[in-house]
Image (tube, rainbow, N blue to C red):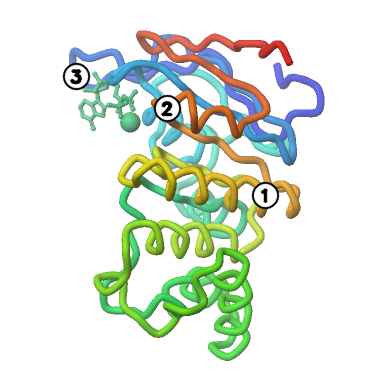
Amino acid sequence: MTPAGSLLSAHGLRKAYGPTTALDGAEFSIHPGEVVAVMGPSGSGKSTLLHCLAGIVRPDAGEISYNGQELTGMTDTALSALRRSEFGFVFQFGQLVPELTCVENVALPLRLNGARRKDAERTALTWLERLEVDDVRGKRPGEVSGGQGQRVAVARALATSPRVVFADEPTGALDSLNGERVMELLTDAARSANAAVVLVTHETRVAAYSDREIVVRDGRSRDMERAV
Ligand SMILES: Nc1ncnc2c1ncn2[C@@H]1O[C@H](COP(=O)(O)OP(=O)(O)OP(=O)(O)O)[C@@H](O)[C@H]1O
Ligand SMILES: [Mg+2]
């Protein structure tokens, strides 16, 4: 069953790694433009849930529905095409390509989707401006600070106008001031583009930027209706 109005939803997800149960009947749903924080202790299954929702890891059982399509029934080729065109990713350590400049890093997913270099770099530059890091456009990731690198990674995730941004501890490697600024820029940019954000985090301070929280414990998720 897909909850009404949801863009991405999952039901009864199970995933085991050998003897370890990572997901044990997890549920999830997110609406277009919504920011959902996935919280819970270390090892509870947060990253596994995110990887399943993003079509990176195949669950052992359960259903994942994206925009009316069933992810679990799709081929690897179809899944990777879907990821490239509809999803954006930000991870804990940015994971930029070290040999490319910052503007080339942001332009890369656009190039992979078939954009010409000049157009891709023009779009990339506008995203670097929005994330307030256009001054490092010509530098390589090794030559910028952690906070600047994460902003470049956020610019790269948003440059293709994804419908869903998956962020796994996107500020985990930053101090609190830089972390808050990155969160502010990420959620503002995503909301104005009507992109949904699945945000995995340990930190209550980071989760405060979300519309709703889901807590994962022992591979099972629970929706926390936040009183506002
Ligand atoms: N590739 C893997 N191979 C074997 N076990 C794994 C793998 N990935 C995750 N696990 C196990 O599955 C469980 C859930 O892991 P997961 O990475 O989803 O937790 P998490 O909530 O993201 O933790 P953290 O907050 O530390 O990142 C853990 O017990 C972990 O050891
Ligand atoms: Mg994790």
Residue at point 42%, 73% (across, down): 105
Query: What is the three-letter code of the residue carrying label 1?
Result: Asp
Quarter-of-image position of residue 6:
top right
Q: Residues within 10 Å of mark 1 (few under 14, many from 20)?
A: few
Secondary structure of residue under mark 1: helix
Q: Earlier in the sequence, mark 3 or mark 1?
A: 3
**Which numbered mark, 2 or 3, is in the foreground of this view?**
2
Query: What is the three-letter code of the residue carrying label 2?
Result: Glu
Residue at point 75%, 52% (across, down): 192
Query: What is the three-letter code of the residue carrying label 3?
Result: Gly
Secondary structure of residue under mark 2: loop
Q: Residues within 10 Å of mark 3 (few under 14, many from 20)?
A: few
Q: Earlier in the sequence, mark 2 or mark 3?
A: 3
Seen in the picture, residue 186 relative to 65 is either above or below; the reply is below
How far across and down, in percent of the image, does residue 170 sit? 42, 44
- Tag shown at residue 18: 3
The residue carrying mark 3 has its beta carbon less than 8 Å from ligand 1: yes
Ligand 1 location (quadrant): top left
Residue at point 55%, 71% (across, down): 128
State left or right for residue 25 relative to residue 85: left
Could you tell me how far apart the alpha carbons at marks 2 and 1 are, in whole angstroms? 19 Å
State left or right for residue 21 relative to residue 66: left
How far across and down, in percent of the image, does residue 146 sit? 32, 58
The residue carrying mark 2 has its beta carbon less than 8 Å from ligand 1: no
Query: Which residue is labeled 2 in the image?
Result: 203
